[in-house]
Structure formats: structure tokens, C-alpha cells
Image: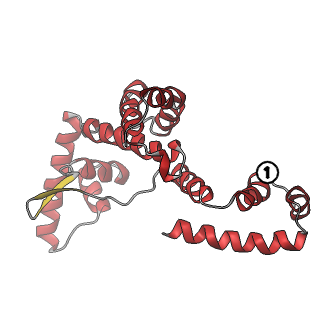
Amino acid sequence: MIQDSAQRERRIEENLGLVHACAHRLQGRGVSYEDLVGAGSVGLVKAADGFDPTLGYAFSTYAVPVILGEMRRLLREESAVKVSRTAREKAMRLVEIQKELRLRDGKEPAVSQIAEKAGMERSEAAALLFAGQPPLPLVTVYEGEERALEIPCESGEQPLLEKLSLEKAMALLPEQDRLLIEYRYFRGMTQTVTAEKLGMSQVQVSRREKTILRTLRGYLSE
């Protein structure tokens, strides 16, 4: 879609806070805050170029996943696993002990057995054995096509993404329904106070609220 250049620039300037919010969430993962902001700014510009206001949702809903995508790409590129030479040597020794015990007993040895034979704490042996494993590639080739490897993990961005999904779903509601949910769940108003503000009875608010919540669940499950 062709958009006015002034609107594009204004979106970028007014939403720089989104970049910093996302950078704060991804801090402490081996990339400096400034580099995260730089990558996120690239994402913000891409979002401003690709945003279509006629679709009916807020720019932030569209922009945040794009910003996070650029930051995660930077993290993937910079997240090389570094193991010291001493740790590598210890890990190699533990692997040799592991092989010896496997041959002797005919089964996979426990970490405690390896640690005892090496004369170290079990926790240290476990960490070294893990460090000695070859890194898992984040991109695999399947039928001639590169595909990103999906590793299940808890994401720090999940609450933010859930909030954005809810905002997107709320934008699809009629104005009165949107206000009802805002009064009840974002401002903490009782059904009685909400009814007074919307010109409804408390019973009407109660019934309408249940219907709206079912509708929102449907939007969020799509």
C-alpha cells in the first residue's frame, strides 16, 4: 500500500518507545542494549513500510513482532557458545572416563559415577559434559530447504504478545462492548458502575459481558 511519507516518518518517531521496550525484555542475552536497539530500529522501519492501516488494528500490534524478529535474528547471529580451553580439556577427560565406564559395565554410566572417578563434584561434571557437546545448529536442511529449528522454551516476550493479541481482538469489538470490557477488566469497575456509565442495567451488563468474553475467546483461538 502507498502511504504518505510524513505519516511513515511520524509512525517511526512516535513508536521508538516500542523498540526500547522490546530491547529491555531481551537484555542480558549476550548482546548489548545499544545493538538490540539498533536491530529493533531496523524492524520498526520495516514495520512502518509494511503497515496497512485499513486492516483495522493498531500500528503497535503489527510493529512489535517485526521489531522482536530483528532482535532475535541478531541474537541468533551473535550467540556463539564460548568454552574456555581448560573447560574443554576437562570435558574431554570426562568423555574418556564415560567411555571407559560404558565399556566396563556395558551400560551408560551415571554422572555421579563419572564425577567420582574424575574426583570432582557431580554438578561440575554435569556442566562440563554439557559444555563438551557439539552446538546444536539453529538451521537444518530438509529436502533441500533450510528451516529454522524450533526449540520449545519459555519466552520472555509471551506476556507482551498476549497483550497485543488481546488488543487486536478488542479492536474488532463494537465500541460499547469494548468500553464494557475496558471498564470491567482494565479499570476494575463493578458491574453496577459500568451499567451506569453505559446506560444499561446491571443484569444487562452481566449478560453482555459473558457474551463478549466468549467472542474474545473465539478471536484469540483463531
Residue 72 in view here: yes
Horizontal relation, residue 82 to residue 140: left or right? right
Residue 136 in view here: no
Horizontal relation, residue 2 to residue 15: left or right? left
Q: Which residue is mark 1?
A: 187
Q: Quadrant of residue 171?
A: bottom right
Residue drawn at (67%, 61%) of the image? 174
Vertical comparison of 13 with 116: above or below: above
Residue nearest the observer in this picture, 45 or 155: 45
Quadrant for the N terminus, please: top left
Q: Position of residue 7 (x, y in %)?
A: 48, 30
Numbered label tally: 1
Q: Position of residue 183 (x, y in %)?
A: 79, 55
Residue drawn at (30%, 41%) of the image? 73
Q: Quadrant of residue 85?
A: top left
Q: Amino acid at mark 1?
A: Arg
Vertical comparison of 3 with 138: above or below: above
Q: Position of residue 190 (x, y in %)?
A: 87, 60
Q: Quadrant of residue 31?
A: top left
Packing grade of label 1 (10 A; few <14, some 14-19, many >=20) is few
Q: Position of residue 17 (x, y in %)?
A: 54, 31
Residue nearest the observer in this picture, 46 or 112: 46
Horizontal relation, residue 43 to residue 167: left or right? left
